[in-house]
């Protein structure tokens, strides 16, 4: 399956392959094939153009293969384009009980925009668990990228977090959307916003000069496991008040 994905198009997150093109499946009967593929949650059979296709979900394949293949997550991540890389980060967060959203955009309505000359922001991935909110910038950096470039990007991510806090309606709506209308959001106050860079390859920089962590995708699971222990070393922003949404009855 890995070889099929490696030869396929990195621009798609699902690969559709005719059964006849997969050598080890060609001799299966229809019943045997379906029983065999039911063992794997990343493969399904779907009909298209009057024939059946084997459909491989790349994100599900990569997350399942962490523990089975000798390939590390960095190699597996190369099967994805930028949008797929963001989706992989989102899936890892979801598997760690985070509520997530991808490609969140907002306008800065505060006075901060006069200092930064920036009115619009986009955040690649946001995840919330308990009262921790990860504000993630996904970077498919190479090892050769300079310290200056990485450091600057991490500082810009911190600026996005500051801008988010300075727009109370935006952050309140975001939190309520992630947690659901039935959640009593005020009971979780204060929320801790954590700017974070997630990179494709291993970098020698683990934290920038403003205490923003840079985490390679390979270590994202362990970063999440150890977050509360290491939080004291990271730059964070506290949100102590939110604006309650009016619920339609």
Image (tube, rainbow, N blue to C red):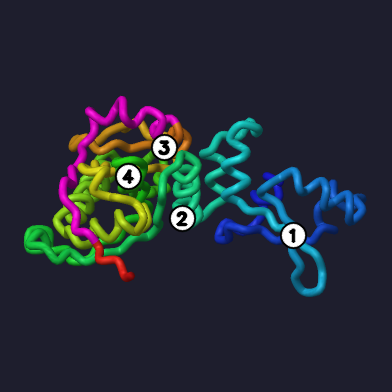
The residue lying at 70 percent from left, 58 percent from top is 55
Query: In the rendered view, does 227 fall on the left or right side of 140?
Result: left
Query: In the rendered view, does 26 fall on the left or right side of 229?
Result: right
The residue lying at 44 percent from left, 43 percent from top is 93
- From this viewpoint, which residue is outermost toward the bottom? 49
Query: Residue beneath label 3, please?
Result: 216
The span shown in magenta is: 222-244
- Real-space CA distance between mark 1 and mark 4, rounded to the nearest whole angstrom: 36 Å
Cβ atoms under marks 3 and 2 closer than 8 Å: no
Label located before the other in sequence (3 or 1): 1
Instruction: Pinpoint residue 75: horizontal percent, then vertical percent.
Output: 56, 40
Label located before the other in sequence (4 or 3): 4
- From this viewpoint, which residue is outermost toward the top? 229
Identify the element where label 2 is drawn: helix
Identify the element where label 4 is drawn: strand
- Real-space CA distance between mark 1 and mark 2, rounded to the nearest whole angstrom: 23 Å
Identify the element where label 1 is drawn: strand
Query: Residue beneath label 1, please?
Result: 17
Task: Identify the mark at residue 82; answer none if there is no mark.
Answer: 2
Identify the element where label 3 is drawn: strand
Q: Is residue 47 magenta?
A: no
Query: Residue beneath label 4, please?
Result: 134
Please tell me which residue lies in front, 169 or 88: 169
Label 4: few (<14), some (14–19) or many (≥20) C-alpha neighbours in 10 Å? many
Label located before the other in sequence (3 or 2): 2
Label 3: few (<14), some (14–19) or many (≥20) C-alpha neighbours in 10 Å? many
Foreground: disc 4 or disc 3? 4
Instruction: Pinpoint residue 232: horizontal percent, then vertical percent.
Output: 22, 28
- Real-space CA distance between mark 3 and mark 1, rounded to the nearest whole angstrom: 31 Å
């Amino acid at each position: 399956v890995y070889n099929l994905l490696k030869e396929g198009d990195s621009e798609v997150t699902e690969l559709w392959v005719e059964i006849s093109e997969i050598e080890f499946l060609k001799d299966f009967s229809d019943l045997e094939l379906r029983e065999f593929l039911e063992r794997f949650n990343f493969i399904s059979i779907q009909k298209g153009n009057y024939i059946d296709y084997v459909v491989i979900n790349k994100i599900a394949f990569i997350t399942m293969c962490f523990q089975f293949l000798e390939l590390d997550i960095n190699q597996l991540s190369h099967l994805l384009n930028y949008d797929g890389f963001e989706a992989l980060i989102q899936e890892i967060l979801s598997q760690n009980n985070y509520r997530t959203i991808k490609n969140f955009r907002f306008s800065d309505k505060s006075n901060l925009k006069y200092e930064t000359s920036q009115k619009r922001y986009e955040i690649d991935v946001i995840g919330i668990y308990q009262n921790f909110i990860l504000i993630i910038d996904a970077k498919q950096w190479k090892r050769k990228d300079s310290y200056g470039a990485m450091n600057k990007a991490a500082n810009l991510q911190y600026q996005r977090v500051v801008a988010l806090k300075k727009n109370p309606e935006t952050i309140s709506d975001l939190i309520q959307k992630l947690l659901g209308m039935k959640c009593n959001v005020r009971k979780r106050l204060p929320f801790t916003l954590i700017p974070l860079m997630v990179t494709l390859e291993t970098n020698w920089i683990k934290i920038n000069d403003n205490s923003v962590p840079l985490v390679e995708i390979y270590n994202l699971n362990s970063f999440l496991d150890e977050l509360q222990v290491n939080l004291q070393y990271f730059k964070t922003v506290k949100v102590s008040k939110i604006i309650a949404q009016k619920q339609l009855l």
